[in-house]
């Protein structure tokens, strides 16, 4: 069996526990991103979604969050950081 990696799944959907739309996330373990997407879709099959879930390696997402925490003191800082990352 292949070594499983951690993927974080972010989605915007109906959160039944408090009856409203919101962003949420969870972790899946899979050998590759394709299988992680399949696991995410299976878990979310009974959830009302707006858009598609975003699946990313956990280590990549964690590194991005640490960079935001370190470099972003305001909303505009975060916006500028995101814009510069997309253009590189």
Image (tube, grey):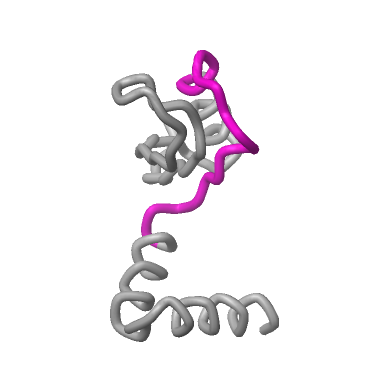
Q: Would you say 69 lies left or right of 56 here?
A: left
- Residue 60 versus residue 4 in the image, above or below: below
The front one of 9 and 3 is 9
Examine the structure image and report whether residue 48 is included in the region drawn in magenta. yes
Q: Would you say 17 lies left or right of 85 here?
A: left
Image quadrant for the C terminus? bottom right
Q: What residue is at 32 percent from the left and 83 percent from the top?
A: 73
Q: What residue is at 41 percent from the left and 60 percent from the top?
A: 61
- Residue 82 versus residue 42 in the image, above or below: below
> Percent position (x, y) of residue 40?
50, 29
The front one of 65 and 58 is 65
Examine the structure image and report whether residue 32 is included in the region drawn in magenta. no
> Percent position (x, y) of residue 66?
31, 73
> Percent position (x, y) of residue 68?
37, 75
Q: How many marks overall?
A: 0
Residue 62 lies in quadrant = bottom left
Q: What residue is at 38 percent from the left and 36 percent from the top?
A: 29
> Percent position (x, y) of residue 39?
49, 26
Residue 24 lies in quadrant = top left
Image quadrant for the N terminus? top left
The front one of 76 and 69 is 76
Give the residue at the far top of this rendering: 46
- Residue 46 versus residue 21 in the image, above or below: above
Q: What residue is at 31 percent from the left and 25 percent from the top?
A: 18
Magenta stretch bounds: 43-59
């Amino acid at each position: 069996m292949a070594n499983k990696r951690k993927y974080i799944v972010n989605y915007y959907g109906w959160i039944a526990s408090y009856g409203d739309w919101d962003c949420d996330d969870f972790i899946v373990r899979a050998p590759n991103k394709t299988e992680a997407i399949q696991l995410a879709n299976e878990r979310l099959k009974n959830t009302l979604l707006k858009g598609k879930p975003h699946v990313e390696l956990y280590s990549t997402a964690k590194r991005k969050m640490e960079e935001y925490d370190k470099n972003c003191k305001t909303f505009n800082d975060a916006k500028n950081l995101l814009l510069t990352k997309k253009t590189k």
